[in-house]
Amino acid sequence: MFDLDALVYADTREIAIKDPAGKPTTWRVSVAGPGHPASAAARAKADQRQQALEAKRAAAIHRNEAPPAADFAEAREFYADQLAMRIVGWSPVRFSGEDFAYTAENARRLLTEPRFGFVANQIAEAVQDLSGFMTGAAPS
């Protein structure tokens, strides 16, 4: 008999961060799966942002004004915030010569630092690859 639990996503997964050349480091980051409360909070925040943007557009149209222009700096900050919300921990690491413990604020700080874009890309790939959160394998 097929067990539906084989299709359930894990709450988290751990990834090894690679350096910009693609070589694995010893630094490991835990990210929230699709059913984790952190992911639900990120989705809720994204929904609220979208509703606010739609309300601004609708209000401008109602006043016969041009819709507000896209704010790309705000969009980058929002994207970094969304990724940071999906990070739920990491192994010990140093940053600028000091211990850099996991906190939500440190995650945001790291992901908004342009020189660490390669880390943001890996976090984004990890949370988008749902197969990495599978707890069991369904028979083929």
Image (cartoon, helix red, strand yellow):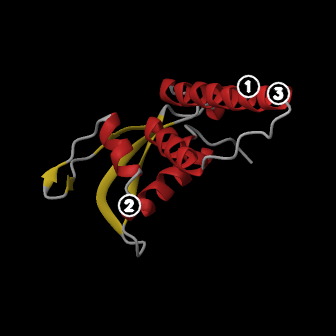
Which of the 4 image quarters holds residue 125? bottom right
In the rendered view, would you say 119 is above or below 82?
below
**Residue found 62% across the figure and 43% down from its top:** 137
Q: Amino acid type of disc 2?
A: Phe
In the rendered view, would you say 136 is above or below 1?
below
95 on left or right of 33: left
116 on left or right of 98: right
Camera-side residue of 129 and 138: 129
* 10 Å crowding of disc 2: few (<14), some (14-19), many (20+): few
Distance from disc 1 to disc 3, alpha carbons, whole Å, reads 12 Å
Which of the 4 image quarters holds residue 45? top right
In this view, which residue lies farthest toward the bottom?
A: 21
Residue that mark 1 sits on: 55
Total marks in image: 3
* 10 Å crowding of disc 3: few (<14), some (14-19), many (20+): few
In the rendered view, would you say 103 is above or below 127?
above
Q: Amino acid type of disc 1?
A: Ala
* Disc with the residue nearer the chain's start (2 vs 1): 1
**Residue found 86% across the figure and 32% down from its top:** 64
Residue that mark 3 sits on: 63
Q: Which dot, 1 or 3, sits closer to the camera?
A: 3
Camera-side residue of 19 and 103: 103
* Disc with the residue nearer the chain's start (2 vs 3): 3
Distance from disc 2 to disc 3, alpha carbons, whole Å, reads 42 Å
Mark seen at residue 116: 2
* 10 Å crowding of disc 1: few (<14), some (14-19), many (20+): few
Q: Amino acid type of disc 3?
A: Arg
Residue 3 visible = no
In this view, which residue lies farthest toward the front?
A: 64
Q: Which dot, 2 or 1, sits closer to the camera?
A: 1
